[in-house]
Image (tube, helix red, strand yellow):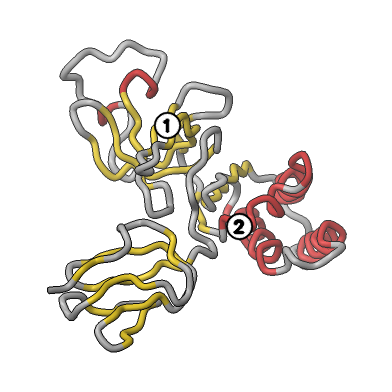
């Protein structure tokens, strides 16, 4: 009889034994060795039916208390909202943390946040089972209206933000866009269409070249060149 060795959503390292027997099937990032399924890379384990697969850790957001993240509402229940955190673990926004307004029991919660809405929220708790609680009470925490949301590698977020916010501030000023960067790798951009596109291209360039020295100067020159091609942004 087959035996699952590792628990779901645990980190596995290359060569680690994940399962024994023939009851399970190797999926992405794993391989079979005789009657064993073995990890082929570093990643988070997922069990999808009989298939065991590994989600690579690079770019995968792991929630931490006090992180400010951008989430999408994926479910509305009688007691709150479930949010997609852009990672393996969803989050729960309870009514008491959703707004400073009093919400009566049985109220229609979609009048506050509806399915597919994006919100900026703060993580207040992460349990050992990776149950995530968030709040909407705090500076800058709000529902996002208009604009567009893009995804970046969450490991590159510190470079996109820059020291004391210097990089993202420069992009905001040069593109005349409102920009919010979530530590989970989602970025919200609001501005005129041409400005938004330039902001996106700039953020993609930062993401791609984050390992290079002199990044701030390179991005500044890039923005100056792009704006001159466009005759300046308005």
Point out which mark residue 155 bears. Answer: 2
Q: Position of residue 152 (x, y in %)?
A: 56, 59
Q: Are marks 2 and 1 in contact (CB under 8 Å)?
A: no
From the viewer's perspective, tell me whether residue 105 is left or right of residue 126.
left
From the viewer's perspective, tell me whether residue 150 is left or right of residue 76.
right
Which image quarter holds the N terminus?
bottom left
Mark 2, residues whose alpha carbon is within 10 Å: few (<14), some, or many (≥20)? Answer: some
Disc 2 to disc 1, C-alpha distance? 21 Å
Q: Please name whichever residue, 33 or 72, is drawn nearer the observer in this view of the structure.
A: 33
Compared with 187, 131 (above or below) is above
Mark 2 or mark 1: name the one nearer the start of the chain. 1
Q: Position of residue 95 (x, y in %)?
A: 31, 22
Compared with 167, 121 (above or below) is above
Residue at 28% of width from left, 15% of height from top? 103
Assign a secondary structure to mark 1: strand
Residue at 41% of width from left, 62% of height from top? 44
Q: Determine which residue is flagged by label 1.
A: 134
From the viewer's perspective, tell me whether residue 38 is left or right of residue 123.
left
Q: Is residue 131 visible?
A: yes
Q: Please name whichever residue, 122 or 58, is drawn nearer the observer in this view of the structure.
A: 58
Point out which mark residue 166 bears. Answer: none
């Amino acid at each position: 009889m087959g035996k699952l060795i590792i628990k779901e959503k645990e980190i596995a390292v290359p060569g680690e034994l994940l399962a024994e027997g023939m009851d399970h099937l190797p999926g992405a990032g794993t391989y079979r060795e005789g009657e064993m399924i073995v990890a082929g890379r570093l990643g988070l384990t997922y069990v999808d039916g009989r298939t065991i697969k590994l989600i690579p850790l690079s770019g995968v957001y792991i929630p931490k208390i006090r992180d400010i993240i951008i989430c999408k509402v994926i479910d509305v229940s009688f007691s709150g909202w479930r949010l997609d955190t852009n990672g393996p673990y969803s989050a729960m926004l309870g009514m008491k943390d959703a707004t400073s307004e009093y919400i009566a029991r049985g109220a229609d919660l979609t009048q506050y946040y509806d399915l597919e809405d994006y919100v900026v929220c703060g993580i207040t708790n992460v349990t050992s089972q990776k149950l995530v609680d968030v709040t909407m009470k705090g500076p800058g925490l709000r529902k996002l209206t208009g604009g567009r949301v893009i995804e970046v590698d969450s490991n590159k977020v510190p470079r996109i933000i820059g020291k004391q916010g210097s990089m993202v501030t420069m992009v905001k000023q040069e593109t005349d866009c409102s920009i919010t960067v979530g530590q989970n790798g989602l970025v919200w951009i609001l501005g005129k269409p041409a400005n938004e596109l330039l902001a996106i291209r700039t953020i993609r360039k930062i993401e791609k070249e984050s390992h290079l020295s002199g990044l701030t100067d390179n991005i500044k020159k890039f923005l100056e060149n792009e704006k001159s091609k466009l005759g300046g942004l308005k």
